[in-house]
């Protein structure tokens, strides 16, 4: 989940202590290239559609076992592609790099994605996508705690994000949806944000595709373990799984995991993490429209108003990043 990008408060992407000490004191401003926007477009659109895919998968498949199978399969496929295109040596990493990739994979996939999949067994896909808009909010706040100085536009985006989240929690507070599902998505957004920020600061594998392999395998195996601990396999009847659930799972493996997650990992190592995280404001628009068109999910006033507020927040964050 490599092109230069602009960052108003340049973040270091450390690989090793000796490289950090040798870095120049002043980091020149960088330009956002077409490759960065292309990767963002993939993450924006494809991940927006994955909320619908997840909702269809959990109709007849258990959440953690299906999620784990998704990422383990995608990780193995990506490992084969990397070995084929770049040689087996491209998959070699140090122990520190492997440990970092495993930690990030647990935060992003087991915590972030896994809890969203679990939540979608009880809440609409469009609402789940809108609640994930908390990711850029948490990223900016985490960057501030770690010493970065986000611009006023980014801070304004945080305020709008919290306002939008307040509106989006109304369905749960009013009993229209299960509040437990809403809380699960908010926790998932925080864990995904921790993984996103950590990946930019830990000694990750230099090859972002290699990093994706180990992240997906670690997170996927952990999700399978959680699924077994929850006894999801006891109620699993493969003969009762619908054809559209299998098709949705295949779509999530190829596009949601192999393509979009890899694009996101590439962005995290080459673009400002807060810019990469802005996908969470665009995904909901795609997810809400698809949920309404395909699954007839209701477009209530909290969803429409909250969605409009959080989409407004992304314009502030993106404009701040571009002006840097």
Image (cartoon, rainbow, N blue to C red):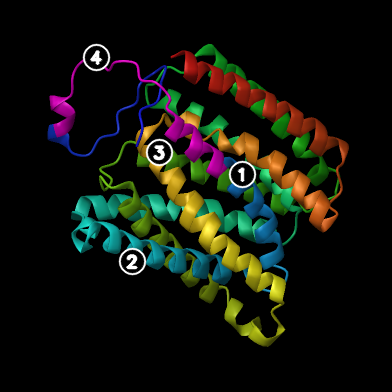
Q: Identify the residue under disc 4.
A: 26
Q: Identify the residue under disc 1.
A: 45
Residue 214 is a magenta residue? no
Disc 2/disc 1 C-alpha distance (Å) = 26 Å
Q: From the top left corner, tell me how far across and down residue 1 is, in percent.
A: 44, 48
Image point (24%, 50%), residue name: 97
Q: Nearer the viewer, residue 135 or 207?
A: 207
Q: From the top left corner, tell me how far across and down residue 100 is, in percent.
A: 30, 49
Disc 3/disc 1 C-alpha distance (Å) = 17 Å
* Pair 3/1: label in front: 1
Reading the chain from its start, which is encountered first: label 1 or label 4? 4
On screen, residue 51 versus residue 219, left or right, reads right
277 over 107 or under it: above or below: above
Residue 80 image label: 2
Choose top left, top right, bottom left or bottom right for residue 87: bottom left
Reading the chain from its start, which is encountered first: label 2 or label 1? 1
Disc 1/disc 4 C-alpha distance (Å) = 35 Å
Image point (46%, 44%), residue name: 264
* Quarter of the image where the C terminus is located: top left
Q: Can I make out residue 197 in this image?
A: yes
Classify 10 Å Cα crowding around label 1: few (below 14), some (14-19), many (20 and above): some
313 over 169 or under it: above or below: above
* Pair 1/4: label in front: 1
**What is the span of residues highlighted in magenta in the rendered image?**
19-43
Residue 268 image label: 3
Classify 10 Å Cα crowding around label 4: few (below 14), some (14-19), many (20 and above): few
């Amino acid at each position: 989940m490599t092109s230069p990008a602009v960052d108003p408060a340049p973040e270091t992407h450390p690989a090793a202590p000796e490289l950090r000490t040798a870095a120049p004191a002043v980091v020149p401003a960088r330009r956002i290239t077409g490759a960065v926007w292309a990767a963002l477009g993939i993450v924006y659109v494809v991940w927006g559609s994955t909320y619908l895919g997840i909702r269809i998968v959990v109709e007849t498949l258990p959440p953690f076992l299906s999620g784990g199978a998704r990422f383990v399969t995608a990780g193995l496929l990506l490992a084969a592609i990397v070995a084929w295109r770049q040689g087996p040596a491209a998959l070699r990493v140090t122990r520190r790099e492997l440990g970092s990739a495993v930690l990030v994979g647990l935060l992003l996939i087991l915590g972030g994605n896994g809890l969203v999949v679990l939540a979608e067994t009880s809440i609409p896909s469009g609402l789940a996508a809108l609640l994930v808009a908390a990711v850029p909010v948490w990223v900016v706040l985490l960057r501030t705690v770690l010493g970065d100085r986000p611009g006023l536009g980014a801070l304004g985006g945080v305020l709008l994000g919290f306002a939008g989240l307040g509106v989006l929690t109304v369905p749960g507070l009013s009993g229209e949806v299960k509040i437990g599902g809403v809380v699960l998505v908010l926790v998932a957004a925080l864990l995904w944000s921790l993984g996103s920020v950590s990946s930019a600061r830990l000694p990750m594998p230099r090859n972002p595709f290699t990093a994706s392999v180990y992240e997906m395998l670690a997170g996927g195996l952990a999700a399978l373990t959680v699924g077994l601990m929850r006894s999801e396999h006891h109620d699993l009847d493969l003969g009762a799984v619908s054809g559209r659930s299998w098709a949705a799972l295949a779509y999530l493996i190829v596009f949601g995991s192999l393509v979009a997650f890899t694009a996101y990992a590439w962005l995290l190592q080459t673009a400002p993490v807060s810019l990469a995280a802005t996908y969470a404001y665009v995904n909901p628009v795609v997810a809400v429209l698809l949920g309404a068109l395909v699954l007839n999910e209701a477009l209530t006033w909290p969803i429409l108003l909250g969605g409009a507020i959080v989409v407004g927040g992304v314009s502030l964050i993106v404009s701040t990043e571009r002006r840097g």
